[in-house]
Amino acid sequence: MILTLKYRKNILTVEMHDRLKQILTTLLVKWECEPIELGGEGDHIHVLFDGHPGLNLTNFIKNIKSVSSRHMRKEYGDYLQQHLWGGEFWNDGSTIISVGASASIDVLISYIKNQGSSDTDPDRR
């Protein structure tokens, strides 16, 4: 799953990414999904997880985005208000890709782990 920030704003700091990963991991477990790898860059996050066959993706994504947005706005509200407006955190859409024979889990884990590794932006503390 790929979630992007509203307006694709490149504003997530390393600290914010770490907190977002904690929040999303907790939510995945509550939805009875197995978190495999989470990572991203300043404007998005990749969430690789193992979901069960009965997972209602519409409700799942709506809840994940709503709850994580609420937590991030509560904890980083002053900072986020400088960059985002209208009480939003995530873009309206999301991307869900199922993994099959075309890509190995190890390749995806490596890709996600390396997100942001070449980031030289001094503002991404």
Image (spheres, rainbow, N blue to C red):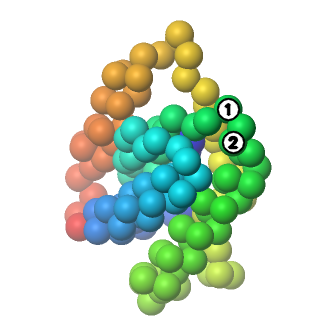
- The crowding category of the residue bearing disc 1, from other C-alpha atoms within 10 Å (few below 14, some 14 to 19, many at least 20), is few
Q: Look at the image and tell me in which quarter the C terminus lies.
A: bottom left
Query: Between residues 3 and 28, which one lies in front from this camera angle?
Result: 28
Q: Is 64 drawn above or below residue 1 in the view shown?
A: below
Q: Which residue is mark 1?
A: 53
- For label 1, the SS is loop
Residue at point 64%, 41% (across, down): 95
The label shown at residue 55 is 2
User: Where's residue 109, x and y in %?
Assistant: 35, 31
Give the percent coordinates (x, y) of residue 73. 52, 80
**Element under disc 2:** loop
State how far apart marks 1 and 2 are (Cα).
Answer: 6 Å
In percent of width and height, residue 22 lies at 38, 62
Of 91 and 60, which appears nearest the observer?
A: 60
The residue depicted at 70 percent of the width and 59 percent of the height is 62
The residue drawn where x is 41% and y is 23% is 105
Residue 124 in sight: no
- 114 relative to 44 in the view: left or right: left
Side (left or right) of 101 relative to 91 = left
CB under 8 Å between callouts 1 and 2? yes
Residue ranking furthest to the top: 101
Where residue 17 sits, quadrant-wise, is bottom left
